[in-house]
Image (cartoon, rainbow, N blue to C red):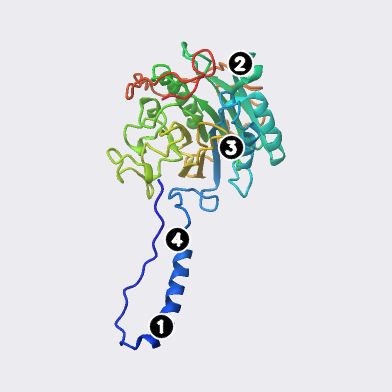
Amino acid sequence: MRRGPLCPRVPAAGRITPAPLPALAPVLALALLLALALAGAAVPESPARADTVTPDAAPALRFVSYNICGNMCGAAPYDDRRRIDSVVTQAAVATWNADQVFLQEVCRPQYDEILRRLAPLGFDGSYAATLAGRASVCGGADYGNAVLVKGPVTDSVALDLTVGGESEPITVPCVRSLLRGRVSWACSVHLYWDDGTLAAPEAQELASRAEAWEAQGIPVVLGGDFNHSPRTSILTHFYDPAVGDGGQGVFLEADETDTDFFDPAVCTAGSTAGSDPLCRSGEPTWNEKKIDYVFFSACHFTTPRGDSLPLDPLVSDHRMLRGAAAARADCGPLDSPAAAAPPGSPSPGLGTGPPRVGAPRPPRPRSRRSAPDRSAPTPPRRPGSGPTPGRNAA
C-alpha cells in the first residue's frame, strides 16, 4: 500500500504583540523561507512504500523467491541479461545479502549462469527439470525449478508431487545445507495452475515431506510459486494454526505480518506471534494476487518479514518476493543427530547422492486431505498452459 506524502506539523502560532509591518517584514520573510526549506526536506518527492523491508531493518536470515518466467518471457522486449542480473544482485551484501534463493520457470542455461556468478560468493544449488528436449521450450534446453543456497549442498532430493493429469511433472528440488551454521532443508516450489483439483494433493504431499523433516528437528524453508491465494484450501496445509483462519500446517509465511494487506473481514489483531499481528494474506506477487510465498518452519524461525518488489516488466510477469526471519533456539536441539549427519550420509527417508525423483516417502503424521479448492472460479488457460510449460492462473 502506498501512502501519501507526510505533512510536517505546524505548531499553532502564539500570541504576539502587534508591530508595524515594515519592522516585521524581514523577520516574516526569513521565517517563510525557513519553513519552506524544512517542508521540502520533510516531504518526499514521491510516495514511499509503507511496508518496505530494508536490509538494515530486516531480520538476519534472508531469502528470495522469484518466478523468473524464463521460457514464456524469453523473447523481446524481455531481457535475459537483466533477468540474471536481478537475481544475482540479491546476494550482494549491500542489496539483500540473500542466504537462499528459490527460482521457478527456469531454463537450464539461466540457472547455470546464475550459479556461475554466485559461486564466488559461496553458493551451491540444485536444478530439477520438468520438461526437456522441446524445441519450443527454452530452445530445447531443460526447463524447471532451482534452489540456490549459500554454502555447500550436503544432500539433495527432487520431490515428485505429480498426481496425474498435469500437463507437465510437478517436481520440487530440495537441498540440505547449513543456514548460517545450522543444518536445514530448502525447497523451490511450483504447484499446479488449476482450480485446486490437482494442486490440493500436491500441496498435501509437499507439506507431509516438509513436516517429516521439521519433526526431526531440522529447519525447513519452502519458497516458490504455489499458484493459489493465501486463504485457499491448498495453502491451509502450510499456515500454522497460530495464524488463525483454519491453518493446519507448521509454517510461518514471510508476508503474513504485513498489516497493509490484511483482509479486514477475517484478519484481526487477535492472531499474533509475539507482538506481530498475523493474517493469511500478503502483498500481490502476480497481477493483483499473492501466489508466491516464503514459508519458514514455525518451530525454528520467528519474526517473519516479507516484501514484494515492484514488477520489472522486462524480466517476468511476477514480482520478486523477498523474505526474512530470525532463528529460534528454543525448539528442541539445535541440530538433531540426523540433521547433523556429514555430507553424503543418509538423511531420514532420503538416502544419499545426487538429486533423486520419487525417493521413499515417510508417513504423514496425520491425514489432512482437503477437498479441491472451489473458492474461486476456474481461471482461463494462459498462453503456455497445456502441452507447453504451465503458467500461473489461480
Q: Which residue carries the number 1 mark?
A: 25
Depth check: 38 or 128 in front? 38
Task: Indicate the amino acid at tag 1.
Answer: Ala
Task: Indicate the amino acid at tag 2.
Answer: Ser
Distance Cα–Cα, label 1 vs label 4: 27 Å
Distance Cα–Cα, label 3 vs label 4: 36 Å
Q: Is residue 248 left or right of residue 339?
A: left
Question: Is the Cβ of the residue at disc 3 closer than 8 Å to that at disc 4?
Answer: no
Question: Is the Cβ of the residue at disc 1 closer than 8 Å to that at disc 4?
Answer: no
User: N-terminal of the two: label 4 or label 2?
Assistant: 4
Q: Nearer the viewer, mark 2 or mark 3?
A: 2
On-image quarter of the C terminus: top left
Crowding near the residue tagged with mark 3, few <14, some 14–19, many ≥20 C-alpha atoms within 10 Å: many
Dot 1 falls on a residue whose secondary structure is helix
Depth check: 287 or 19 in front? 19
Distance Cα–Cα, label 1 vs label 3: 62 Å
Q: Which residue carries the number 3 mark?
A: 100
Which residue is situated farthest in the front direction here? 22
Dot 4 falls on a residue whose secondary structure is loop
The picture places residue 39, in percent across and down from the top left corner, at 44, 66
- The answer to whether one can see residue 141 in this image is no
User: N-terminal of the two: label 1 or label 3?
Assistant: 1
User: N-terminal of the two: label 2 or label 3?
Assistant: 3
Q: Which mark is residue 136?
A: 2
Q: Which mark is residue 43?
A: 4
Crowding near the residue tagged with mark 4, few <14, some 14–19, many ≥20 C-alpha atoms within 10 Å: some
Distance Cα–Cα, label 2 vs label 1: 76 Å
The picture places residue 162, in percent across and down from the top left corner, at 50, 15
Which residue is situated farthest in the left direction here? 265
